[in-house]
């Protein structure tokens, strides 16, 4: 990805400006070209890769932005790109790139949550990002033969219920999806269905790791800036050794997180068989570290850090939710341990 470093810096700068808008949303992102970053050029997209999407995700974490981008721009587009090409898929990709459609991918907790009986969908899943904002849902399910498929279904379909699921983190909009014989259209994966479904889950985990890395970077920058201007006993608090050590610890966490996230993004872009391992390494470390880093930022801001006006509480809530979405650190560490023939017993 180093060959695109200059492009990524420009994209990062633009993203920071766009996310300063009072309520950044889908229409604004479509105008900026973000909704079609990975969509092929012949379908009115930019034809780039998940590496560029990852840049946007990190900036959304920095801004703690409340948008539909995770559910639709990341999971929805990723789901469509994993499908066999066809008129229906291509039309939906084109409409997504132009902002006309908001297809939200329902990929967690995996294909076993929903079952497809010919044309009827049944099942239930919780903590689905941005489902309430969707024009269509792309639900990962299993057909009668047990094969993973995607069910394309309109949010207004009889037998389908999308119920808002309030959480403490107000920067995310989550929902419970319940299907009871809802009629939908089955779309098939290109290539091995099990592998494709696994790649979607890895993509989701890496997306959350990108967001958490952005949270960490923002909290480190804010804390260092605050330590330079806040004075105690006639000196900047940043001159105190204890504060310096705490900031150094935060920097180490951020630096390790960057390496892990960059490696995971690279495997998602290349379709490497190591993507599963890299995704679990990034998700398990970065989302856990983000909670620690934001907590330390709140502490180093002193009393002001615990006030509503400081805004650090929003980052702490988002970091805590990110830690649980698409597999907790413990889940991903168990996955890694199993790969190497060991057993993980931590929490």
Image (cartoon, grey):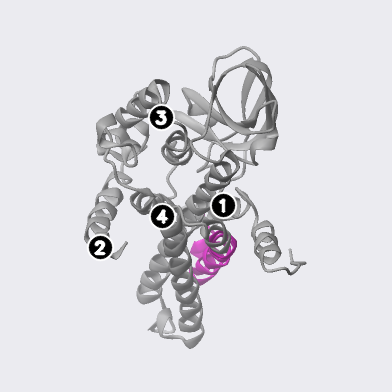
Q: Residues within 10 Å of mark 4 (few under 14, many from 20)?
A: few
**Which residue range is magenta in the image?**
282-307
Q: Give me the C-alpha separation between circle 4 and circle 3.
A: 20 Å
x then y, percent, for residue 140 = 59, 33
Q: Give me the C-alpha separation between circle 4 and circle 2.
A: 15 Å
Are the residues flagged by discs 2 and 1 in contact, CB closer than 8 Å?
A: no
Q: Earlier in the sequence, mark 4 or mark 2?
A: 2
Q: Earlier in the sequence, mark 2 or mark 1?
A: 2
Label number found at residue 211: none
Q: Is most of the magenta stretch helix, strand or loop?
A: helix
Nearer to us in this view, 225 or 65: 65
Under tag 3, what secondary structure?
loop
Q: Give me the C-alpha separation between circle 1 and circle 4.
A: 25 Å
Q: Earlier in the sequence, mark 3 or mark 2?
A: 2
Q: What residue sits right under mark 3 in the picture?
A: 85
Q: Residues within 10 Å of mark 3 (few under 14, many from 20)?
A: some
Q: Nearer the viewer, mark 1 or mark 3?
A: 3
Quadrant containing the N terminus in the rendered view = bottom left
């Amino acid at each position: 990805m180093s060959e695109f470093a200059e492009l990524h810096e420009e994209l990062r700068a633009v993203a920071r400006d766009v996310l300063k808008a009072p309520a950044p949303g889908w229409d604004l992102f479509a105008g900026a070209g973000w909704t079609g970053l990975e969509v092929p050029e012949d379908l009115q997209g930019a034809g780039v890769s998940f590496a560029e999407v990852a840049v946007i995700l990190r900036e959304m974490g920095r801004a703690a932005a409340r948008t539909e981008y995770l559910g639709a721009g990341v999971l929805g587009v990723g789901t469509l790109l994993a499908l066999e090409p066809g008129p229906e898929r291509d039309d939906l990709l084109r409409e997504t790139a132009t902002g006309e459609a908001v297809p939200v991918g329902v990929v967690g907790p995996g294909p076993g949550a929903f079952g497809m009986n010919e044309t009827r969908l049944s099942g239930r899943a919780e903590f689905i990002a941005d489902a309430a904002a969707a024009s269509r849902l792309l639900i990962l399910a299993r057909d009668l033969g047990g094969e993973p498929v995607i069910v394309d279904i309109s949010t207004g379909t009889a037998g389908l219920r999308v119920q808002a699921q309030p959480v403490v983190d107000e920067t995310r909009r989550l929902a419970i999806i319940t299907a009871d014989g809802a009629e939908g259209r089955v779309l098939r994966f290109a290539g091995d269905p099990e592998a494709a479904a696994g790649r979607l889950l890895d993509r989701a985990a890496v997306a959350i790791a990108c967001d958490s890395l952005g949270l960490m970077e923002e909290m480190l920058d804010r804390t260092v800036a605050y330590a330079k201007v806040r004075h105690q006993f006639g000196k900047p608090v940043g001159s105190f050794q204890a504060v310096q050590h705490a900031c150094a610890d935060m920097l180490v966490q951020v630096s390790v997180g960057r390496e892990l996230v960059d490696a995971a993004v690279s495997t998602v872009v290349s379709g490497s068989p190591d993507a599963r391992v890299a995704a679990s390494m990034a998700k398990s470390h970065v989302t856990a570290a983000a909670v620690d880093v934001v907590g330390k930022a709140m502490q180093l801001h002193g009393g002001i850090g615990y006030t509503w006006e400081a805004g650090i509480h929003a980052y702490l809530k988002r970091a805590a939710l990110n830690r649980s979405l698409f597999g907790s650190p413990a889940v991903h560490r168990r996955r890694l341990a199993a790969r190497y023939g060991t057993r993980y017993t931590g929490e």
